[in-house]
Amino acid sequence: MTRNPNISLVGGPLHVAVVTDDPLLKTGLTSLLAHDGEVEVVSLDKADVALWDSGPDSTRALSRLRELGELRVPVVAAVGDASHLAPALAAGARGVVLRDQVGSGIGAALAAVRSGLTVIDSALAQTLVPAARPDAQGKKRPAAELTDRETQVVTLLAEGLSNKLIADRLGISDHTAKFHVNGVMAKLGASTRTEAVVEAVRRGLVTL
């Protein structure tokens, strides 16, 4: 899991709601979090951040992702499949971890999300977008560098802005904004805007 083990829970205990349909998992996660003296498991209406479980059924998990936007607090989603990373982020999750690898570091991940950061399990991040793609001879080529304008564009993408709002913010036409967005996605090897943002974060181009 991508995290900073030195994150301090500024502002008192971290109030976490565990959201899952699995009573055994809820008991296990609650017990795990209770061992962190700076984390307090509470009901959803009192939570600073939620740990949301997608469940063991991959097909049902995708249909349940819409629940993330209804929780009204920052969410770390525990998913069972790497293919659920991009959908979870698109649904509003601020953190994504593998449900079968949730361990002692989850408290730091939840604290980071409460602080406004985005946290992605390192194994998931590596499967989302490769750092380099093979050329025609099968050799890996380095990813293209973004221009200053493209860096501005991906920063605005990370804020969730549409092409029109990006154009307004940068004082350019909608067509030019779309051109730059497509260029950013191509250079980052991304097929969606969300993947572009995740890859930009992975490279340190954007801080969320």
Image (cartoon, rainbow, N blue to C red):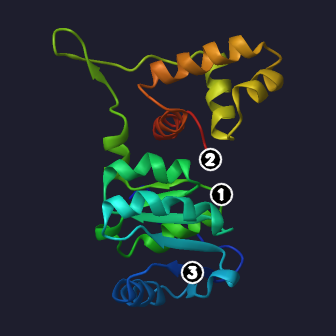
Residue at image mark 1: 116
Q: Is residue 4 visible?
A: no
The residue located at (34%, 59%) in the rendering is 59
Upstream in sequence: badge 3 or badge 2: 3
- The residues bearing labels 1 and 2 have C-alpha atoms spaced at a distance of 7 Å
SS at mark 3? Answer: strand
The residue located at (72%, 76%) in the rendering is 11
Q: Observer-nearest residue: 200 or 180?
A: 180
Give x and y (percent) for residue 190: 44, 29
Upstream in sequence: badge 1 or badge 3: 3
Name the residue at the top extreme.
136
Residue at image mark 3: 17
Could you tell me the amino acid type at mark 2?
Answer: Leu
- The residues bearing labels 3 and 2 have C-alpha atoms spaced at a distance of 23 Å
Specify the quadrant of the image occupied by residue 49: bottom right
Could you tell me the amino acid type at mark 3?
Answer: Ala
Q: Observer-nearest residue: 28 or 71?
A: 71
The residue located at (64%, 83%) in the rendering is 13
Residue at image mark 2: 208
SS at mark 2? Answer: loop
| Circles 3, 2 touching at the beta carbon (< 8 Å) | no
SS at mark 1? Answer: loop
Give x and y (percent) for residue 23: 39, 89
Specify the quadrant of the image occupied by residue 69: bottom right
- The residues bearing labels 1 and 3 have C-alpha atoms spaced at a distance of 17 Å
Residue 72 relative to residue 42: left or right:
right
Give x and y (percent) for residue 101: 30, 68
Eye-nearest disc, 3 or 2: 3
Upstream in sequence: badge 1 or badge 2: 1
For mark 2, does the 10 Å Cα neighbourhood hold few (<14), some (14 to 19), or many (20 or more) residues? some
